[in-house]
Amino acid sequence: MTGRDLLGNRLLCGAVGVAGLFCLLEASGRTGFIDPDAFPLPSTVLSRAVLMTNDGEFVADIASTMVVWAVGLLIATVVGVCAGFLLGTVPFMERSFRPIMEFLRPVPSVALIPLALSLFSDKFDMKVTVIVYAATWPILINTMYGLKDVDPLAKETLRSFGFGRSAVLWRVSLPSTAPFIATGVRLASAIALIVGISAELLGGGLDGIGSYVLQSSTGLNAMEYIVAAALWAGVIGLVTNGLFVLAERRAFRWHTARTEVV
């Protein structure tokens, strides 16, 4: 079975699973097993989600969330890669900062939102800061892991031809670590989206998917709007993850092939 056939089967299995869950929830609501007033029917949510595409305010909220997500992820990528290379290539730096990393990494990013609110008066800066904190860790860890996975023979071979430390880093370490960095960025993208929407929801503000959910929670048919907005958030996360996966496969086919052989 080729990789394309396997991907097709995964998509088909995923579609069947989603359709099965949809039918199960729909039947549970129509038979009274689940109270439709407490949790709206999937058909009602889907219909509302489609109608929301004509809502200019909601479309603007999606755009606002995506801008914050993109800015935060970009900054986290730069910080994570630079810090990862520094800690991964200088043993003294890794030994010095390892205790700090192990202390800060388990701290939930959502728990830092109140602190960020007190430090930043601008909502945009607050959301970007929280996203950067949360999204930097997977990129940093994957970069350090990728550096440790670099073939030492390749580095020694380049040194034997007279290349310096920076040349070895640029010609060997960076290309070998790139697939790990890409994986870290893909994982960080999902974290950034979750944290960004959470910051909008908990930190208030006038724009973003989280703010839309917060404002809709006090209106008519609130649960219907909330679930529909959550559905769109899930779709955005699914699409962005799929785009990152596609980019990884096209950019690092050699790494995928090597992994399959191993």
Image (cartoon, rainbow, N blue to C red):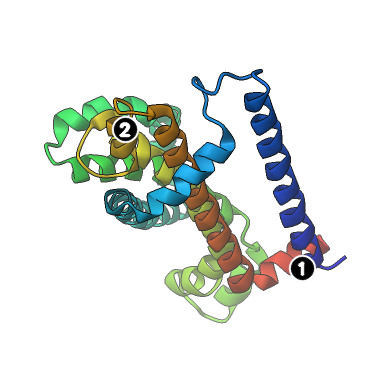
> Is residue 139 visible from the viewing direction of this image?
no
**Residue 47: % across, % down:** 50, 45
In the rendered structure, find residue 35 and report the number of the disc placed on it: none
Q: Nearer the viewer, residue 73 or 4?
A: 4
Q: Determine the image quadrant of residue 19.
A: top right
Q: Nearer the viewer, residue 141 or 107?
A: 107
Q: Residues within 10 Å of mark 2 (few under 14, many from 20)?
A: some
CB under 8 Å between discs 2 and 1: no
Question: Residue 95: horizontal and vertical position, in percent?
Answer: 44, 38
Query: Residue, x 35% and y 57% (percent of image)?
Result: 74
* Residue type indicated by callout 2: Ser
Q: Amino acid at mark 1?
A: Arg
User: Where does label 2 land, which residue?
Assistant: 216
Name above or below for residue 241 compared with residue 230: below
* Crowdedness near tag 1: few (<14), some (14–19) or many (≥20) residues, C-alpha within 10 Å: few
Q: Which mark is in front, 2 or 1? A: 2
Question: Which residue position holds label 1?
Answer: 4
Q: Closest to the observer: 177 or 64?
A: 64
When the figure is inspected, residue 163 is found, relative to residue 84, above or below; the finding is below
Element type at mark 2: helix
Q: In this view of the protein, can residue 206 be seen by the observer? A: yes
- Position of residue 106 in the picture relative to residue 116 (left or right): right
**Mark sitting earlier along the chain (2/1):** 1
**Cα distance in 3D space between marks 2 and 1:** 42 Å
Q: Relative to 44, does residue 259 appear above or below in the rendering?
A: below
Q: Secondary structure at mark 1?
A: helix
Image point (49%, 42%), residue name = 231
| Relative image position of residue 186 (x, y in whole percent) | 52, 54
Apparent side of residue 122 relative to residue 200 in the rendered image (left or right) = left
The residue drawn where x is 88% and y is 65% is 1
